[in-house]
Amino acid sequence: MPAQIAVGLNRGHKVAKRTLGPRPVKRKGQKCKRSTVTREIIREVAGYATYEKRMMELLRNRLDKRALRFAKKRIGSHTRALRKREEIQGALRKKPKE
């Protein structure tokens, strides 16, 4: 806290510390309801891409590692491939048996 003198380490006026709200960048990456619903509707209407269908087939045959390698080759990133494999496995779990 400044001592209200002109020189030294604690120079300057006494002021109260402002409490600021959270910055907008802190919201980055959070899923909002609107975009989630939009993505679900698009998935219903458009269905799955060809490579996603092939991944489903590999996962049905218990070839998880092969599906991951396939996704990595198509998507280009290991982390994204892991996420995609989880997404497809979740879709297979939700889908009723034919």
Image (cartoon, rainbow, N blue to C red):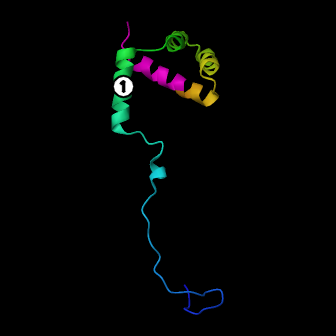
Question: In which quadrant of the rendered view does residue 22 lie?
Answer: bottom left
Residue at the outermost bottom position:
5
Q: Looking at the figure, which quarter contains the N terminus?
A: bottom right
> For the image shown, how many numbered marks are present on the structure?
1
Residue at the outermost top position:
98
The stretch in magenta equals 84-98
Above or below, comparing residue 16 to residue 3 in the picture: above
Question: In which quadrant of the rendered view does residue 38 lie?
Answer: top left
Residue placed under numbered mark 1 in the picture: 40
Relative image position of residue 89 (x, y in whole percent): 48, 21
User: Which residue is located at x 36 percent, y 13 percent?
Assistant: 96
Between 95 and 17, the residue placed more toward the observer is 17
Give the prevailing secondary structure in the magenta stretch.
helix
Above or below, comparing residue 10 to residue 21 in the picture: below
User: Which residue is located at x 58 percent, y 28 percent?
Assistant: 80
Task: Confirm whether the magenta stretch covers residue 50.
Answer: no
Q: Secondary structure at mark 1?
A: helix
Q: Looking at the figure, which quarter contains the C terminus?
A: top left
State left or right for residue 1 relative to residue 48: right
Task: Confirm whether the magenta stretch covers residue 91.
Answer: yes
User: Which residue is located at x 54 percent, y 91 percent?
Assistant: 4
